[in-house]
Amino acid sequence: MLRLTEIRLPLTHPADHLKAAILKRLGIAASELLAFSIFRRGHDARKKNAIMLVYTVDVEVRNEAALLAQNIPHVGPAPDMRYRVVAQAPLDLQERPVVIGSGPCG
């Protein structure tokens, strides 16, 4: 999965313009795009007469390795966001655990 950042679109853009912007940024055909999801959407209101929406999007494509090799600006691998269960001590632990740095400063 790829993460695209800094996709800027006008505030009142139609929904299909986001997909077109993704395809344009990656330089691929629509058939190569499998799926995408919006990770973050923010507003850029620095210019009051041209307020923009700034998207960060996670994208699934057919040939991810080839796109990463092109070093396209603002395109990189998406971080692994899967949940991982917190490790627990075994039930037959012989000694008490030592807790270091539990205060507000570490």
Image (spheres, helix red, strand yellow):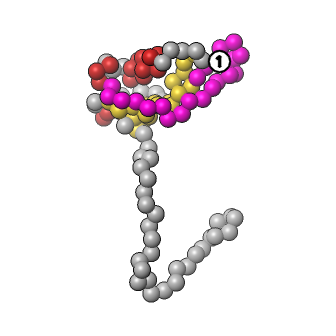
Task: Please provide percent x and percent y for residue 59.
Answer: 39, 31
The prevailing secondary structure element of the residues shown in magenta is strand
Where 29 falls versus 89 (above or below)? above
Task: Please provide percent x and percent y for residue 97.
Answer: 52, 80
Instruction: Check the image and name the residue furthest to the bottom.
Output: 94
Task: Please provide percent x and percent y for residue 81.
Answer: 44, 47
Q: Dot 1: few (<14), some (14–19), or many (≥20) neighbours within 10 Å?
A: some
Residue drawn at x 50%, y 35% as measured from the top left: 39
Labels in figure, total: 1
Residue drawn at x 46%, y 27% as measured from the top left: 73
What amino acid is at disc 1? Ile
Is 16 magenta? The answer is no
Q: Is residue 38 left or right of residue 70?
A: right
Task: Please provide percent x and percent y for residue 106.
Answer: 64, 66
Where 28 falls versus 3 (above or below)? above
Instruction: Check the image and name the residue furthest to the top.
Output: 49
Q: Is residue 36 left or right of residue 12?
A: left
Please tell me which residue lies in front, 69 or 34. Answer: 34
> Could you tell me which secondary element the residue under label 1 belongs to?
loop
Is 47 magenta? The answer is yes
User: Can residue 25 be seen in this snapshot?
Assistant: no
Residue at the disc numbered 1 = 51
> Magenta segment, which residues?
33-53
Q: Quadrant of the N terminus?
A: top left
